[in-house]
Image (tube, rainbow, N blue to C red):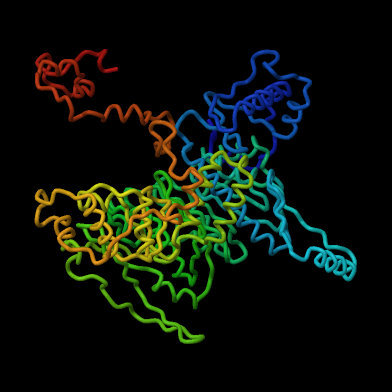
Amino acid sequence: MLVRTARLFPLIISHHLHQSSTHSARQKFWSSVGSAAAASRGLRSMEPLRAAQDPQPEGASPAGGGAAAGLEETPQTGLLPGETVVREGKAAILFPSANEVFYNPVQEFNRDLTCAVITEFARDQLAQRGVKVVVPGEKERVVVSLSEEKNEADGQSEEEKNGVKEPVVTAVVGEKCESGLRVLEGLAASGLRSVRFALEVPGLRSITANDFSTKAAALISRNARHNAVGHLLQASCRDASMLMYEMRGKKERYDVIDLDPYGSPASFLDAAVQAVGEGGLLCITCTDMAVMAGNSGETCYSKYGSISIKAKYCHEMALRIILHSLDQRAGVYQRYIKPLLSVSVDFYIRVFVRVFTGQATVKNSASKQALIYNCVGCGSFHLQRMGKRTSHGKHMKYSSATGPPVGPQCEHCGQRHQLGGPVWAEPLHDTAFVQKVLTAVSGNPSRFGTAKRIEGMLSMVTEELEDVPLYYAVDNLSSTIHCNTPPLLQFRSALLHAGHRVSLSHACKNGIKTDAPPAVIWDIMRCWEKANPVKREKLSESSPAFKILSTEPSLQACFTVREDANPQSRKRHLTRFQENPQAFWGPKARAKAGGGLCTDLQDRRKQCQNKRKNQITDSSQLKNFPCKRFKKGTCSHGDDCCYSHDLQLMD
């Protein structure tokens, strides 16, 4: 039992670095040796950590300096029955076998990317404070100068002029930096992310790992003690929103706030935009993709103030919905956001934004949002800005936008439009910052277990068109007119030959971002259909395909492959769209508030599979299935019941 009473919890939190007095020195020694042996088997594993029963573990020497050093540097904590150790990055997290605290190994990419982003953010921020960030395994960045001799002479004269060269303050991982960043993880669960921050991100002054669950908060405290980061990491058992509301003061705000909830972060956004410091970093994860991808537009509006659309570009639209919600809530407090990186990964989205204060800049917010007119027939879309701003020298004039940009029916297929949004219509990324993160990760690939995927993802992000919202899916365009799908390079080349810009999208494997209007895209598809004709006699006259193909193209598309049609990330065969490494790779079950073992997701899936297939037509076969009412004691049919009352089938 992690916490016996609420009264004992502050005592547990306060003793981060002290070993329990009930363990003998011999037990602590062999526990350290067992942990070191487990660490040598892999950085990312989940295995039971047992106290050594043998007098000497295999491959370990009691007199060896490695085991002794591990005992001195990493205080070991006693494990509870059935507890396991989760190893990820440089962290070793104690994790209960019961589903009391949430953990998902799929999110390792999320945590790796967050460590990389916060490291570069800390590098930029601390450089302004005269602090140099040192990352293990990273080569020192050298700036090549064309006038090296002159610079050296100037440097010597400057040193002589000033007398003594000023010392350079360095910040390394695992050590407290007095002028470093203050980090809050509002929903920490086991504390794995916060422990990794303490062990892998330099330049931090403090880390607050908060969770509303007392069991989770106590586990965070034990994990901080287990990884010897109690000097940096403090556990907290508070409501995340209330904690952030209390830290709204300008001198109390956090430099970095990380929110990774199970589901929607909507209820925490208002407090988060107030509790982050000036120019601070907000890291937000959304896993409620069913809502944000168009399955429940009304629910999306109630949470984020935007209506989602079920379209091929739904994943990028989800990114723009959360950015719209953040900017809208920040604007209430005369603050605005600047996105650094926004990615759609697996089953979730992740955004990194900076928050600033400025009444004049907040006025631009309306012109940064846009409504989406999406055709239900052919998938063509148009954006309508919510506001309009015009520059007049040093002054900016704001006015209402004019529209709509479409007619009652789609000009290409004659179908109706559906209205979505408003969404964020400005760039999703800061390309210069993303390039810094990409350079750091590719230059130190051994730092993260998912470094190859991060490099591939960020490479695609840097290649995306910044000023082009949303994208088209090539296979969906072909499906609309029922023709063969053109090769990706030929379709990109056709757009380039037509004089338009084009790029891929990290959010969709077949996604195409282009500044070409829908009319040009459908002209290219008409030209492709002429070379790969479809059976038009089978098309309904009311179908979008018939309406589109009935119009002659106004341009002649050229499908000759161009050299610049193939992006560098594709040429280098980077890991861009990774296949699932194992079955059932996705969201995990929510942690139970009262603890206890939960039903395995795979067992639940098996129970729900094939319910409508192979249906029983012979009533005599029903005797092979247990009677649910008999199990509850409410069956009144007795022996005449068509289901079985055999107790063995009830198990």
**Residue shown at 33%/79% (left/top)?**
400
**Along the line of sight, the residue nearer the viewer: 264 or 504:** 504
Position of residue 216 in the picture relative to residue 158 (left or right): left
Q: Is residue 513 above or below residue 163?
A: above
Counting every numbered tag in the picture gives 0
Q: Quadrant of residue 254?
A: bottom right
Looking at the picture, how far across and down is residue 284, in whole percent? Answer: 47, 53
Q: Position of residue 129 (x, y in %)?
A: 71, 63
Is residue 298 at least partly visible in the picture? no
Using residue 538 as the reference point, say whether residue 357 is left or right of it: right
Q: Relative to 519, does residue 348 appear above or below in the rendering?
A: above
Q: Residue at x 28, y 27 (%)?
A: 607
Q: Quadrant of residue 470?
A: bottom left
Q: Is residue 562 left or right of residue 184?
A: left
Q: Is residue 568 left or right of residue 41?
A: left
Where residue 433 appears, as percent x and y from the top left, is 56, 59
Find residue 380 and report its horizontal and vertical position in percent.
Answer: 26, 61
- The image quadrant of residue 651 is top left
Residue 549 shows up from this direction? yes
